[in-house]
Amino acid sequence: SSKRWINGAYREDDIAFKEVNTDLLLSWRDRINPNWRYTVSAGANRMDQSIENKSTQAGQLSVPNVYNLENSKIPLEIAQYNSEKRINSLYGIGQISYRQGLFLDLTYRNDWSSTLPVGSESFGYYSASVSYVFNRFMALPNWISYSKARFSVASLGNDTRAYQLRNTLRFNRNYGSSPLVTNTSTLLNSGLRPERQNSLEVGGEIWFFNNRLMLDVAAYQTRNTDQIVRLPSSAASGYADRVENGGVVRTRGLEAMLQFTPIKKDNFSWTTSANFTSSRAVVEELPQGVDQYVIGYTRIYTGGDNSVFYIVKEGGRVGDLYGTGIKQYQGRDVYDQNGIPVRDGELQLLGNYNPDFIIGFNNQFRFGPLTFGFLVDWRQGGTIVSRTKSLGLSSGVLEESLAGRENGVIGDGVVNIGTEENPNYVENTTAIPAVDFYNQYNNRANEATALYDASYVKLRQVSLYYQLPQKWVKFIGFQGISVGAVGSNLWLFTENPHFDPELSAMQGQDLRYGVDDMSYPSSRSYGFSIKTQF
């Protein structure tokens, strides 16, 4: 049982997702002369996707701790959602090359989606890329093994999920013995257009010292337009929100990879590599007549006073988190004259769940038939709103709440000893019982006091493989067999001591990032692996 489910509760979810793809591909390659070659491909695809979601809940239990739907004290609550989606596609791919050093690649694809209205259901994808291999056309120093530059542009289309065009009635709880149907709270749109993303990328790679050292760098920009979003509606319309096209989001990013083989012997080698990724998505424009809108939220309990909102504003970033907290004066918490923190009910920017950058550090050591490897991930930046922190501190079950239990807690902040019109802020010196402090300061409605830095360093994977001798392998008809042991998520260093920051929350059927909302814990795994080559 809990505060919400006083007599306990039990729920069963049955979720089935199925996707079937049917493909046809034809390819032709030839050369015009020794210098010019080309490849042409054409194909078709049909994608059928279906989702079945059934949920049955016993809101109260007749007998405590007996988790069975037949043990429900009240009528069962049943919800069901089924959806089907189909996309038919035709596509073509072409490449022409000169002296195997200058390449031009062209692609085109057209989709027909069942989720868009007639007249807008067809949308295209197209791209063009040019790459130039310097070694094929000029003499380079001996210490440069290979060098290539590349540039590409692309335009992509996107549809939406099923059943976003016309409003229909849905079943609700019966009124007595009579069935009851109601309208949905979202006004759907039969005039939706496909989303569009235009992108460009420039990059290059270079190898040094007989392919012992490699650097690959790429910078890119994407611009998303005509996004399909849900916007708030006037209460007079009878709907809470509406579906429309609109908005412009620009994303710029940098990716780099450095690979180095410092030791390369017959019986021993060491190869190390590092991947760097950083991107930033900024909202340049919102749909007409809107200065901001909520694209999602997470909350534990019913009601809006404990919610984290995902809000986009012009000039803001995708992933910005908003919530409420303690009133501030020049960056410091404000307390009343009794030492109680003063709550501020206005929404404030809590942070952004996206990282500043991510680095993956991979190492492979080969000693004869043995190969040892490990992968370390470093994520820097980002914010997490932690329900574990707020509920754990306010209820006194976390170790951090031990502070002040004997002599009380003096909140770090200021007190206004003046008036609202003529404030005079001084240092807070009033101690209050720890139970009162944590109940007020870390109340679940104060999202700003439940923040953690989402940065972490994680030992993602460790592996050890043994390659079987060739005479054994050939005897059983393989080209190669390796057996080994693998461990994942073996070590974690992060600011918060209670959970893995690499998590997400569930709100209904949707994943929400940047919030620890009673999320499932991450798992450490150990396994045995066999790799075969035919």
Image (cartoon, rainbow, N blue to C red):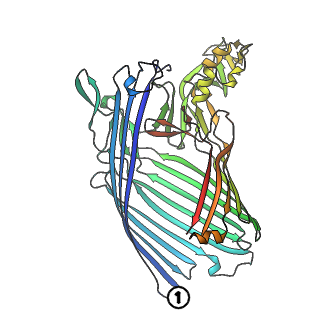
Identify the residue shown where x is 49% and y is 54%: 223
On the picture, is 414 further left or further right than 447?
Answer: right
Q: Nearer the viewer, residue 316 or 197?
A: 197
Identify the residue shown where x is 35% and y is 26%: 76
Query: Can residue 528 be seen here?
Result: yes
On the picture, is 63 further left or further right than 474?
Answer: left
In the image, residue 365 sits, relative to residue 237, either above or below, namely below
In the image, residue 498 sits, relative to residue 189, either above or below, namely above
Q: Nearer the viewer, residue 402 or 133?
A: 402
Badge count: 1
The residue lying furthest to the top in this view is: 338
**Residue tagged 1:** 34
Q: Nearer the viewer, residue 89 or 372?
A: 372
Answer with the quarter of the image where residue 364 lies. bottom right
Instruction: Name the spot of residue 267 as percent of width and height, x first.
Output: 76, 68
Kind of residue at disc 1: Pro
Q: Nearer the viewer, residue 428 or 373?
A: 373
Q: Secondary structure at mark 1?
A: loop
Instruction: Name the spot of residue 212 as percent of width and height, x first.
Output: 72, 69
Identify the residue shown where x is 59% and y is 51%: 279
